[in-house]
């Protein structure tokens, strides 16, 4: 179960999300330029996405 959640209000949703390539578990996906989605079954809670997003959209719950 993922302990990371995405705040889609903070995300401007106007660019390809770099976190898709940052996640070592392949747990992050994006539809178009929308806010990314986390696959809780794949997430290993490494925290890379949390420290990488410039808008601080991801956070541990
Ligand atoms: S890096 Fe952050 S601001 Fe950019 S698309 Fe991903 S979640 Fe949104
Ligand atoms: S915490 Fe790590 S494994 Fe989980 S979604 Fe973020 S980058 Fe991927």
Image (tube, grey):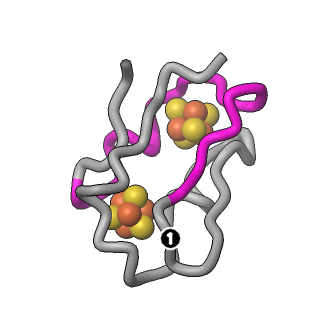
Q: Nearer the viewer, residue 47 or 57?
A: 57
The C terminus lies in quadrant: top left
- Specify the segment rendered in magenta: 36-55
* Quarter-of-image position of residue 22: bottom right
x%, y% of residue 5?
44, 34
Image-quarter location of ligand 1: bottom left
35 shown above or below 1: below
x%, y% of residue 39?
70, 38
Q: Residue at x 61, y 42 (%)?
A: 38
Residue 35 part of the magenta segment: no
Examine the residues drawn in magenta and state their main secondary structure.
loop
x%, y% of residue 2?
59, 23
27 shown above or below 19: above
55 sits left or right of 4 in the view? left
6 sits left or right of 51 in the view? right
Q: Residue at x 33, y 32 (%)?
A: 59
Q: Residue at x 66, y 16 (%)?
A: 1
The outermost residue toward the front is 9
Q: Which residue is mark 1?
A: 34
């Amino acid at each position: 179960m993922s302990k990371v959640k995405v705040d889609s209000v903070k995300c401007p949703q106007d660019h390809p999300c770099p976190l898709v390539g940052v996640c070592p578990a392949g747990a992050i996906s994006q539809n178009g330029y929308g806010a990314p989605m986390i696959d809780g079954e794949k997430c290993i809670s490494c925290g890379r996405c949390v420290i990488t997003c410039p808008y601080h959209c991801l956070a541990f719950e």
